[in-house]
Image (spheres, rainbow, N blue to C red):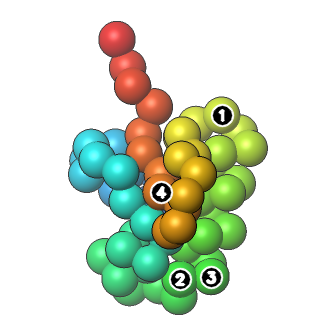
Amino acid sequence: MPSRKEEVLRYLNQFGKKISASEVGDALQMDRANASRYLNDLFKEHRIEKLSGKPVLYQALQTE
């Protein structure tokens, strides 16, 4: 069974657009704070992009 962090990454890859931690949390039925933690971990691992602003948005890295 994949970890929750891997579920977040898979969702971002499938979604294909910019998304907030709140939207990820709602879609995956998890608390926004947990979604934010997973998203920030994935960003630190250079697996997703983080776009500054309010709210902070995340998106999957573009694959070529």
Disc 2 target residue: 32
Whole-percent x, y for residue 38 in the image:
62, 63
- Residue topped by disc 3: 33
Question: Type of residue at label 2?
Answer: Arg
Nearer to the camera, 12 or 52: 52
- CA distance for labels 3 and 2: 4 Å
Crowd class of label 2 (few under 14; some 14 to 19; many from 20; radius 10 Å):
some
Residue 34 left/right relative to 11: right
Disc tally is 4
Task: Give the answer, above or below, for where 38 lies relative to 16.
Answer: below
CA distance for labels 1 and 3? 20 Å
Residue depicted at x 54% and y 40%:
49
User: As rendered, which of 7 and 25 lies closer to the eye?
Assistant: 25
Q: In the image, what residue type sits under mark 1?
A: His
Q: Position of residue 35 (x, y in %)?
A: 55, 72
Locate residue 46, reporting x and y percent: 65, 34
- Left or right: residue 61 versus residue 3 is left
Q: Are marks 3 and 2 in contact (CB under 8 Å)?
A: yes
From the viewer's perspective, is the residue at label 3 or at label 4 nearer? 4
| Left or right for 35, reference 29 | right
Q: Nearer the viewer, mark 4 or mark 1?
A: 4
The residue indicated by pointer 1 is 46
Q: Residue at x 39, y 25 (%)?
A: 62
Which amino acid type is shown beneath numbered disc 4?
A: Leu
Label 4, residues with CA under 10 Å away: few <14, some 14-19, many ≥20: some
